[in-house]
Image (cartoon, coloured by chain):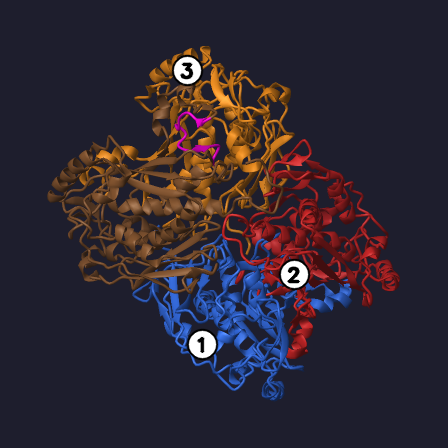
Chain colours: A orange, B brown, C red, D blue
């Protein structure tokens, strides 16, 4: 497949450019007989959409999802679920000056290298807007997982040098940074706002956890649970890495410190982040991803135009100074999709038995 | 595919348990008409094999590769290249006591959860020995890449808390740690040896770079170059994460600091690690992976047996106290395989040439 | 993938039920920089749409295609092309009586066995209407193939026991049966019309040819050109088989009769139908498919309801008495997609040129 | 994948040339905890091997299968099962004269067009010998299917113009033609022997049936059960088509004649050949394939050499005058693989529950 599909059993294919008619997704592999809550899909999209707060871009799109297929009388039929989101805010003329300039930190240069041409309006296909389609698909996956008692949640762990000390999942959706620590959230917001005022941006770290996974989920060797999660995360623009459990800290740990020992109650620690040999342990899946500063900044930068000449660029418009809060629902969506994809491959009957 | 294959155009499928008759690989997609240096394949295997130094396990296997197909008169024919490596050192009786005990940090517990049974001898399918098959396949990929001027090299950047300050690629193969800094290499070796003497192990960080890549390599959205590399790395046992370019450090960087600006000579920095929007920039691909301490240690640990009873375990035998030096060729192999896989899919020839 | 995608390099994913909001397709792998003639796509859809003549169902749908992505200023960008076709004629109430009855010759029974529920309106996902999405995708493939001098054409070779004796490609689009022989066309039309008047239907044979293929197209062993074509054809509802070149007649032929000998001008015959060892020979690709009688007939038939009780059914409404004329563009579309898929994978450019 | 793999859940990858060191297969997706009868695998190979009778080629290979992985103490572990068959009869010198000549009816010409070079010895990769690897894999699939009450059997329905009138499955393995009708078997044998004596060959038709399938097996739209079976059959060299149930005869049938009506006992006929809408009906799966005359004949033929000059060729050695009897086990193997592949994707627990 040429790269716009993900997953083998619960498989998604996305399409659309940021300033074309619409973006969307086909979900192939939605299990049958699942009542679908379409309002939940919309709520998930609302968590990702721009303009939620002063630290998210005010591009004013409604991001209304329309479901074209796969449901019958409110219930999934097992056939593909197609969802589209019209692009209502298509002021592409605003992008005309970038037609021939490679914006630093964007995919402008590399797309030209690959394709020889590109839809330059707002990033075209490489725009973060593509992730709205993933969130819609993830909202289906979450509904299926919920029936198996599996829950996925992500939050901003760090931004602008401010790191959360506590993890309060209930607080996450109550602050514009989607931070997990009330004290840190305020500091983060202040630090990010200050940089935004300067026309700059800043990076952060998002952490994600999934609970309720059965042990033994995943496929050995190449299709490990953590390998697939890593692939899913690095497929999100701005994500520059991933670490599971103790992560990079294992570099300085000894075997006695790092091995998760067991007693009758189960694992005594979770340095593994919920994965051993590529299969889930039954402990919470836990990973973190570094998120780079939004590349669109209004401060002057040096770059090239398509003729190879050096030019100065100041990327206008208001952009998210820190993309972490809006990446959170995308991270959850992709995590839910990976987990469900493996769950559907399990050799046991997890869904409502039917007549056959 | 059930998980033992990797890649779509240069595709590998591995098989074999550590104490079965043999392990091996089928490479499907080897381009035709490439003269194959079989001695080079063996040399790559020798870099991974046990017993190279006092900091690698002395399991004394020759790891002789035998090529069964795909070559004719020394040249690749375009048909599958099957390579097998016999398991000559099969003292499986040594593992009998682990038949019913879950070794901490190993996949014993999770394999039982998934399959209901397992070949317990030396890790069976989840043994690091499986990676020898990948190294053999990677040795083919490297030979093809070399013809396009692409070179992949990895080294130990950090181990036991000792980090390399300089990067001297020529030094890497001249020290048992495969460190890239002569001064650090000695300290690392001493620190690792001390922990080995205690029956303990320790983690580290491996860094990998690939040079000579054309710009525009990769597929957008889900099959990004960095997403595929991440998947490849996390498919290696003991690897707990990955970061590209500035990696986790982006969390504290601003847009002005992190964006790689350009002038007529090209990019002025490489914080991106050679990837923008999932496509290669033409700068060196650069990433790092944390490697956990070898889980097999002779110090006493608490675990469960298959009946659910808590037991104490001391994993006997001599194991690599730090697996970094032997993971280096595996990292190179998988990186070469990913790059070649994308290179074979490049849009060349039959359609209108574009400006690149 | 769960079954709604086809192809690996030029890959299509279709969605939609016959009486849902819309059907559509995502084409992933459209090569970049191809000027796209959208009017041609519509003309291809018009060839498949109902109501073209008295021997096609008068369901009056406009089948207007809308392109949502993948084109920029009239040229393909290399990103997914999403196309949707709204379902304007959704008189689903007409189907209410079939909610609990398995129509003979339809997928009603088997869908219930697989999914436990179904969208019963007009066949739902199993409706022939799904093939409109394929025709739209095929219209893109045809435009790309044309640039390489490859042309695909199909026609009705036989229907209602009347077989074409001559093959006049220019005549095909000038008669409602899409027959390739003017004399036979009239007889066919009369025979089919007579059966239609009785409320019955009838089968036929469609023949397809593709010219201009380079030799050596295909992949050996499992992914043979003929194997992929066969898979594509049998994926079309109502198609019950396929034969290439001499086809079933080889059963009575000797080696001397069947082997295609060569002299300096090339092959002296084409019993192989353009494929040897799964690879194109450069001769025209040639195959035939048997098409079953439309299962929807108004004559009384015995079947079961979903409670397992025997019932009599008379399928009302006007249906195509012979589906051959409308399958012709679908056969062409799928053939074009298969050929382009292989063409995009051809080994060009980066490795040593060979003699071809 | 480059074409040497088949299947998604029970996936096989074959390798090897007819005169290389060995051929073989990796089966990925063998369910765990299945006791494996290795003698049965050998017996299946014996059914395909050359030299069984005067109408099969006397190339004297033992075709001994060796299992390298995936079994532990006689039971499948769920990891890849690698099987190799050494090529003991490698008189490749006998083929030296064909190094630069394209044998009519063989893939010699097309392989050169694709790859630019080939292993010319005995067909190399395109040799029918590759199918031995499939038979070994199929023997595993059959053992799994047997546990679900599914049985696959094929036979020669027609050869040299002689067609079986009755179908006696018990007789098939008791005659060298593997015909299903004792009377016809004798005539066939005589007719084939006469042609063999002349140095000629002849074609035939093989029929296959599978019983015990649950209803609803398959995936709709592109991955239909019949589409996958068709792909599997056309992937076998010498097979030029396929028809299910009534097959090509539907061309002359009406809807009333062809539709399979139902009453309380189930379907009243099986014109569909066991598939509706791409899903199994629960009736026997039934299909037929035309098998072309063996292309290797000792009568003089016109062809080209690699320099483009016309030459006369008489293919020496003794070859199967009719390949039907030896294709029978290959057809069964591929059919079993397709069915198991779908069965493993079903959403219910068909295999021994394990502890998770």
Per the image, label 2 sits on a secondary structure element best described as: loop
- Choose mark 1 or mark 2, whichever is in front: 1
Q: Do callouts 2 and 3 point to residues on the same chain?
A: no
Q: Which residue is mark 3?
A: A192
Do the dots labelled 1 and 2 sit on one chain?
Answer: no
Viewer-proximal residue among B312 and C121: B312
Question: What's the distance in space between the residues labelled 1 and 2, CA to CA?
Answer: 31 Å
Q: Are marks 1 and 2 in contact (CB under 8 Å)?
A: no
Instruction: Specify the segment rendered in magenta.
Output: B265-279
Magenta-drawn stretch, dominant element (helix, strand or loop): loop
Q: Quadrant of residue B208?
A: top left
Q: Is residue B270 magenta?
A: yes
In magenta stretch: residue B172: no
Front position among marks 1 and 3: 1
Q: Residue D280's spot in the image, x, y percent? A: 59, 60
| Residue labelled with disc 1 | D93
Q: Which chain is disc 1 placed on? A: D
Residue D345 vertical placement versus A49 (above, below)? below
Which chain does tag 2 point to?
Answer: C
SS for callout 3: helix
Q: Are marks 2 and 3 in contact (CB under 8 Å)?
A: no
- Camera sees residue D281: no
Q: Quadrant of the C terminus of chain C?
A: bottom right
Residue C162 in view here: yes
């Amino acid at each position: 497949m040429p790269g716009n599909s993900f997953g083998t059993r619960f498989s998604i294919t996305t399409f659309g450019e940021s300033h074309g008619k619409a973006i969307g997704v086909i979900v192939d592999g939605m299990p049958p007989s699942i009542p679908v809550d379409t309002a939940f899909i919309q709520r998930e999209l609302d968590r990702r959409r721009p303009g939620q707060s002063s630290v998210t871009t005010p591009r004013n799109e409604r991001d209304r999802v329309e479901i074209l297929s796969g449901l019958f009388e409110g219930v999934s039929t097992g056939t593909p679920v197609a969802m589209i989101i019209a692009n209502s805010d298509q002021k592409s003329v605003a992008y005309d000056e970038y037609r021939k300039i490679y914006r630093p930190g964007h995919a402008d240069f590399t797309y030209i290298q690959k394709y020889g041409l590109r839809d330059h309006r707002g990033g075209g296909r490489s725009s973060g807007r593509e992730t709205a389609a993933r969130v819609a698909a993830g909202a289906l996956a979450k509904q299926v997982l919920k029936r198996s008692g599996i829950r996925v949640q992500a939050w901003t762990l760090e931004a602008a040098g401010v790191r959360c000390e506590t993890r309060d999942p209930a607080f996450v959706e109550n602050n514009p940074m989607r931070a997990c620590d009330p004290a840190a959230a305020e500091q983060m917001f202040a630090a990010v706002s200050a940089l935004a005022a300067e026309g700059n941006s800043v990076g952060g770290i998002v952490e994600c956890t999934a609970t309720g996974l059965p042990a033994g989920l995943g496929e050995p060797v190449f299709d490990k649970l953590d390998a697939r999660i890593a692939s899913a995360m690095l497929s999100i623009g701005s994500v520059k890495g991933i670490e599971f459990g103790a992560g990079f800290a294992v570099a300085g740990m000894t075997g006695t410190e790092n091995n998760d020992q067991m007693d009758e109650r189960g694992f005594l620690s979770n340095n593994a982040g919920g994965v051993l040999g590529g299969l889930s342990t039954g402990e919470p899946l836990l990973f973190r991803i570094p998120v780079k500063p939004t590349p669109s900044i209004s401060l002057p930068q040096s770059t090239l135009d398509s003729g190879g000449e050096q030019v100065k660029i100041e990327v206008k418009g208001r952009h998210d100074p820190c993309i972490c809060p809006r990446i959170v629902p995308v991270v959850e969506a992709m995590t839910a999709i990976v987990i469900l994809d493996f769950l559907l491959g399990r050799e046991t009957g997890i869904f409502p038995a039917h007549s056959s």
